[in-house]
Amino acid sequence: MSMKGVFTALSGAMAQSQKLDTISNNIANVNTPSFKRDQQVFQEYLTANEKPPSVIQVPKVPASIESFYDMQGGDKSYVDTAGTFTDFSQGGLKPTGNPLDVAIDGKGFFEIATPSGVRLSRHGSFTIDGNGQLVTKDGFPVLSGSGEGGVDPASRVIRVGMGSQITISDNGDVMEGENLIGRLSMVEVADKDALQKVGNSLYDFKKNFQPEVSVVQNPSLKQGFLESSNVNIVREMTDMIQTTRTFESTQKAISAYDSMADKLVNQVPKTS
């Protein structure tokens, strides 16, 4: 009697456990501005398909007594976690009344200078640090367009006078009173699968990706607003209930195989 099915059930349990972790993270960030929900991706892992034809000979005849011999893994399949993907759909706009809060209404990302290099973000909750720089809540400088001061991030930092009245227009122009002091750098990534979250509402590019990045010509920004998370709490709770039930089903399957193994080892020999 073959017990290899327990490994299929185990792979399913592990996959559902990872999905629960992803859903839990979405729920935890339901109130995080500009947060984009993640979704776990699964695929079937067919053992036979992972082996070269030279080392496996899977029977090609209909099931019969003659065909019951070593399948060499041809009859095995597992649940393989193919990682997560991020849903970049637009979140709602929430008014804050803070003139340094800026929401992106549509496509695009802000460019943010960090110690690890330039990163992208849609979190527009900005402030002014002690050096008069426009920065994120974590103190990372917000960059102006690359055409203003060259490509060096240090030369693209937006500086304002302390206590100045700041106005940010819909196209990203940063005004200090009547003076234009910069334009927020807004870029778009053609293939968003090239992006990965790196914490603090920032995105970086995955290794071995060469993404196509372009400047957003007509951005739509809203001063005094923040983009809300695109997490739908009802959907996430429904997915959590469904995933939990699936996880429990795989646990029952594992327990059933364990029970069969116990009978094979401890009861069948005694009756022989």
Image: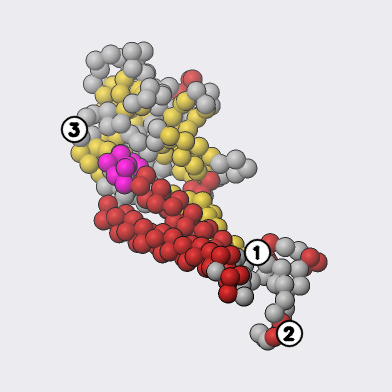
Q: Residue 11, how many percent across, how many down? A: 53, 58
Q: Which comes before the other along the chain, label 2 or label 1?
A: 1
Residue contact between numbered discs 2 and 3, judged by CB atoms under 8 Å: no
- Left or right of residue 62, residue 168 in this image: left
Q: Quadrant of residue 1?
A: bottom right
- Would you place residue 5 above or below residue 20 in this image? below
The secondary structure type at the circle numbered 2 is helix
Residue linked to disc 1: 47
Q: Residue 264, how many percent across, how many down? A: 57, 68
- Looking at the figure, which quarter contains the C terminus? bottom right
Q: Residue 175, how many percent across, how many down? A: 30, 25
Residue linked to disc 3: 97
**C-alpha gap between disc 3 and disc 1:** 57 Å
**C-alpha gap between disc 2 and disc 3:** 77 Å
Residue linked to disc 2: 66
In the image, the segment drawn in magenta is 27-35
Can you tell which of label 2 and label 1 is closer to the viewer?
2
Res 196 label: none
Near mark 3 (Cα within 10 A), the count class, few <14, some 14-19 or many ≥20, is few
**C-alpha gap between disc 2 and disc 1:** 23 Å
Near mark 1 (Cα within 10 A), the count class, few <14, some 14-19 or many ≥20, is some
Residue contact between numbered discs 3 and 1, judged by CB atoms under 8 Å: no
Residue kind at label 3, given as amino acid type: Gly
The residue sitting at 52% across, 26% down in the picture is 116
Residue kind at label 2, given as amino acid type: Glu
The secondary structure type at the circle numbered 3 is loop
Kindly tell me whether residue 234 is visible in this rendering.
Answer: yes
The residue sitting at 50% across, 37% down in the picture is 204
Residue kind at label 1, given as amino acid type: Thr
